[in-house]
Image (cartoon, rainbow, N blue to C red):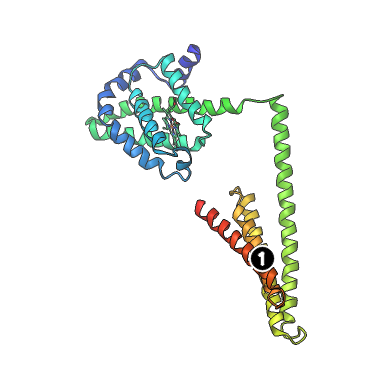
């Protein structure tokens, strides 16, 4: 452990001069610690899923205190085993809650910029400011290195053999991708067929045994089906491009299918009971759709 700490510092060119620089900055940074917390949170809250991790006031309060301590400790001058144990714990805490490493990288970028601004504002000599900034950059990068290692360590866990497992995962990934492509092809085919049905219905609006209402409703039904296929295709393409799985689209498909059924049954005046059931189903699905849309 001690060896790896020393070599890590050596790889970043972290010298006793850097330790002295950081210690000399401690009083200045302590004065700006509260400002740091405020700006850090202002920055982090714009991450789309920040609320998923910092989910209540208690966690936020704890995190603010932990971050403040971490920030001030960057300038403690003690960069031995205890310090590295602590920052490893921070890395592991983020891995444990599945915090995307990208968030940590972006937040660290913010810390770089914040420290740089304080130094430029408060240190009059440009040369000295540049020298101090280099030391701050080094310790922040060393922290990021340790945080990143926690994610890599977590990924290294395997059950039988790392090679076999990554091969299996790759194979499964490719297979899923292939199935998704087949799904897209199926949807294209379905789209063509529904388009055919729409054209057929349209052509028969006036010839549907003299019943224009029936002809119009069937055309509307096939138009709705076409809309469903387009929705499904859009969702599948977005999914293939790495987008989120949209559960909402399945509800909209079910909604459209039932609405189409209502259109058809509305032609038979005796099917009142069936219509009420269908309307109740639309109400339930509509409510679910609204709930999901609200959560999203
Ligand atoms: C510069 C980047 C960051 C640093 C230095 C940092 C620091 C810390 C520290 C010191 C802890 C406490 C670790 C422990 O329990 O020993 C922690 C935990 C945690 N961090 Fe961060 N953090 C950073 C970025 C983020 C970001 C961007 C998020 C979310 C958007 C986040 C969410 C959390 C959460 C949810 C916990 C657990 C809090 C708890 O339950 O006590 N962190 N972090």
Query: Residue 246, how many percent across, how many down?
Result: 60, 52
Element carrying mark 1: helix
Q: Nearer the viewer, residue 137 or 203?
A: 203
Q: Quadrant of ligand 1?
A: top left
Q: Residue at the spot x=46%, y=14% of the render?
A: 6
Taking depth in this image into account, of 135 and 39 the one nearest to the observer is: 39
**151 or 62: nearer the viewer:** 62
Task: State whether residue 15 appears in this view.
Answer: yes
Please tell me in which quadrant of the rendered image residue 221 appears: bottom right
Residue at the image point whose x is 50% and y is 15% from the top: 4
The residue drawn where x is 62% and y is 55% is 235
Q: Is residue 261 visible?
A: no
Asked if the residue at label 1 sits under 8 Å from ligand 1, the reply is no
Q: Position of residue 105 (x, y in %)?
A: 46, 35
The residue singled out by tag 1 in the image is 277
Relative image position of residue 168 (x, y in whole percent): 73, 34
83 lies above or below 30:
above
Query: Residue 214 or 178: which is nearer the viewer?
Result: 214
């Amino acid at each position: 452990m001690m060896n790896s700490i020393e070599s890590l510092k050596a790889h970043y060119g972290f010298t006793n001069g850097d330790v002295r620089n950081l210690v000399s900055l401690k009083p200045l940074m302590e004065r700006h610690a509260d400002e740091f917390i405020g700006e850090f949170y202002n920055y982090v809250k714009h991450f789309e899923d920040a609320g998923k991790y910092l989910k209540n006031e208690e966690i936020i309060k704890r995190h603010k205190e932990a971050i403040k301590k971490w920030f001030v400790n960057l300038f403690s001058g003690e960069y031995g085993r205890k310090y590295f144990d602590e920052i490893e714990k921070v890395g592991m805490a983020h891995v444990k809650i599945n915090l995307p490493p990208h968030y940590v990288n972006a937040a660290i970028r913010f810390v770089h910029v914040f420290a740089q601004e304080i130094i430029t504002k408060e240190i009059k000599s440009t040369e000295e400011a540049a020298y101090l900034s280099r030391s701050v950059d080094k310790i922040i990068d060393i922290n990021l290195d340790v945080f990143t290692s926690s994610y890599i360590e977590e990924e290294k866990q395997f059950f039988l053999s790392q090679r076999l497992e990554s091969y299996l995962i790759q194979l499964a990934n490719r297979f899923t991708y292939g199935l998704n492509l087949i799904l897209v092809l199926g949807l294209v085919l379905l789209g063509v067929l529904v388009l055919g049905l729409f054209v057929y219905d349209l052509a028969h609006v006036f010839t549907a045994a003299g019943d224009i209402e029936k002809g119009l409703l069937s055309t509307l039904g096939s138009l709705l089906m076409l809309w469903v296929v387009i929705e499904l295709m859009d969702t599948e393409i977005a999914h293939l491009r790495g987008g989120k799985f949209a559960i909402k689209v399945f509800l909209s498909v079910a909604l459209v299918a039932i609405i189409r059924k209502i259109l058809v049954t509305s032609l038979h005046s005796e099917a009142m009971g069936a219509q009420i059931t269908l309307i109740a189903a639309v109400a339930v699905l509509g409510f679910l759709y609204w709930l999901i849309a609200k959560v999203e």
